[in-house]
Image (cartoon, rainbow, N blue to C red):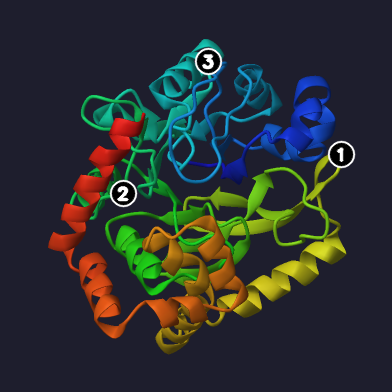
């Protein structure tokens, strides 16, 4: 190969209500100078964070049900994306109909996809493209949140350490460079949890040359591990604009430059404005990337990763514990106001021990998960 290969990766893209008019009437303004980067790359991908469908039948789930108008799929192709990942927690928000509509629309406009399909076997298929004589493989996984394909139903490709790591090894044996998109981790947390770091490093050990974690809605941190790049949180690319929420309104454009001798990953800063997204100025980008790199220096410190994660979890406990115990919204809100004191008052020591064992032990967790999944199916 005599020429370099340039691959551009954007994070989560979802046409929320505040950007709906731009998607419909002025997509060039919406994408602004981002489209030039896409057009000048050898291959460009993103995570498409919802189905594109006219369906008005959302599934029963926690969290919002998101969708895009059918025309958005062709728009992404026209702007410059070559492929989209569908492995995310919203692709099944409008059931199998939503997934099927999205796949049909993508096929109609020759926008390639990976990480989603009509069944588990189709959803896990990698996208392998030959660029300037090199085989580049794209693989994506999603954590389990009302979204996964099964043997007989449509959805996203789920991550299973008993299968997925071997899958990456097999893909690596048939490819020159493997890029993994992992849709998971905790929202609004910029460092990897101990488990997320372990997963991503295992993917690298299995053959991934780069792993990009999405879903967190904030710019995270990165590390170089065994000659591979791991990004723990790419931030939003297009997910609407929130006044005063700088963390939500920013994201990274990742570019991988592959040469005969090595691969280099660089990052640019994009920000959401009321009238679309744009690349930040060189000065603002330099300042933010400097902060990003400074935070990233802590990622190699195992003690820091563990202690910072514990601290974050204690702050989240007022929200999580009422949800786990199926309290009402009123009790949930009150518990957050009093900073988890209501939970400590009502949940006795024995209850806390029992709860821990039910969610920590794989056997007990499997019983709970199977029962609750079947209960959820009855509500559909």
Q: Is residue 32 in view from this perspective?
A: yes
On screen, residue 162 versus residue 101, left or right, reads left
Comparing 149 with 271, the one in front is 149
Which of these two is toward me, 177 or 251? 251
Q: What element carries label 2?
A: loop
Q: Residue 110 placed where, x, y %?
A: 53, 16
Question: Residue at the location (72% across, 56% down)?
Answer: 250
Q: How crowded is mark 3: few (under 14 residues within 10 Å), some or many (20 or more)?
A: some
**From mark 2 to mark 3, how far is it between C-alphas?**
26 Å
Residue 289 in the image, given as x and y percentages of width and height? 71, 68
Please, is residue 235 above or below residue 320 in the view? above
Q: Earlier in the sequence, mark 2 or mark 3?
A: 3
**Residue placed furthest toward the top:** 108
Label 1: which secondary element: loop
In which quadrant of the rendered view does residue 211 lie?
A: bottom left
Mark number, residue 275: 1
Q: Is residue 278 left or right of residue 159?
A: right
Q: Mark 2 points at which residue?
A: 159
38 over 263 or under it: above or below? above
Q: In this view, does 52 lie above or below 276?
A: above
Q: Which residue is drawn at 41% across and 49% down?
A: 180
Q: Position of residue 248 (x, y in %)?
A: 70, 56
| Residue under pointer 3 | 105
In this orientation, does residue 226 appear?
no
* Label 3 or label 1, whichever comes before in sequence order: 3
For mark 1, does the 10 Å Cα neighbourhood hold few (<14), some (14 to 19), or many (20 or more) residues? some
Tell me if 185 is positioned left or right of 217 in this view: left
Q: Looking at the picture, how far across and down is residue 155, in whole percent?
A: 37, 31
């Amino acid at each position: 190969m005599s020429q370099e290969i340039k691959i551009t990766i954007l994070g989560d893209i979802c046409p929320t209500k505040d950007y709906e008019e731009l998607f419909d009437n002025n997509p060039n303004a919406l994408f602004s100078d981002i489209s030039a980067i896409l057009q000048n790359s050898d291959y460009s991908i993103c995570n498409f964070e919802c189905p594109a469908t006219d369906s008005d039948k959302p599934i029963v789930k926690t969290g919002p049900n998101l969708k895009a108008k059918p025309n958005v799929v062709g728009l992404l192709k026209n702007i410059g994306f070559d492929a989209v990942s569908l492995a995310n927690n919203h692709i099944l928000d409008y059931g199998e109909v939503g997934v099927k509509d999205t796949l049909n629309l993508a096929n109609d406009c020759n926008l390639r996809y990976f990480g989603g399909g009509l069944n588990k076997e189709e959803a896990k298929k990698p996208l392998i493209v030959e660029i300037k004589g090199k085989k580049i493989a794209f693989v994506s996984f999603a954590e389990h949140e009302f979204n996964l394909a099964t043997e007989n139903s449509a959805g996203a490709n789920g991550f299973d350490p008993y299968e997925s790591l071997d899958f990456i090894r097999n893909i690596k044996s048939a490819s020159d460079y493997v890029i993994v998109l992992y849709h998971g981790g905790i929202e609004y947390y910029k460092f990897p949890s101990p488990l997320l770091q372990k997963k991503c490093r295992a993917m690298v050990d299995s053959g991934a040359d780069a792993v990009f974690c999405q879903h967190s809605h904030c710019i995270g941190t990165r590390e170089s591990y065994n000659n591979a790049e791991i990004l723990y949180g790419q931030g939003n690319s297009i997910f609407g604009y929130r006044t005063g929420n700088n963390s939500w309104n920013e994201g990274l454009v990742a570019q991988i430059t592959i040469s005969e001798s090595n691969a280099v990953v660089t990052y640019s800063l994009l920000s959401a404005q009321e009238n679309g997204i744009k690349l930040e100025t060189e000065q603002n980008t330099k300042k933010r990337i400097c902060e990003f790199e400074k935070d990233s220096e802590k990622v190699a410190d195992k003690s820091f990763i563990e202690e910072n994660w514990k601290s974050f979890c204690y702050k989240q406990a007022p929200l999580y514990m009422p949800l786990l115990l199926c309290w009402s919204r009123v009790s949930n809100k009150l518990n957050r106001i009093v900073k988890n004191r209501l939970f400590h008052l009502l949940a006795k020591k024995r209850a806390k021990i029992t709860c821990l064992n039910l969610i920590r032990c794989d056997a007990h967790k499997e019983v709970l998960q199977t029962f609750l999944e079947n209960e959820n199916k009855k509500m559909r």
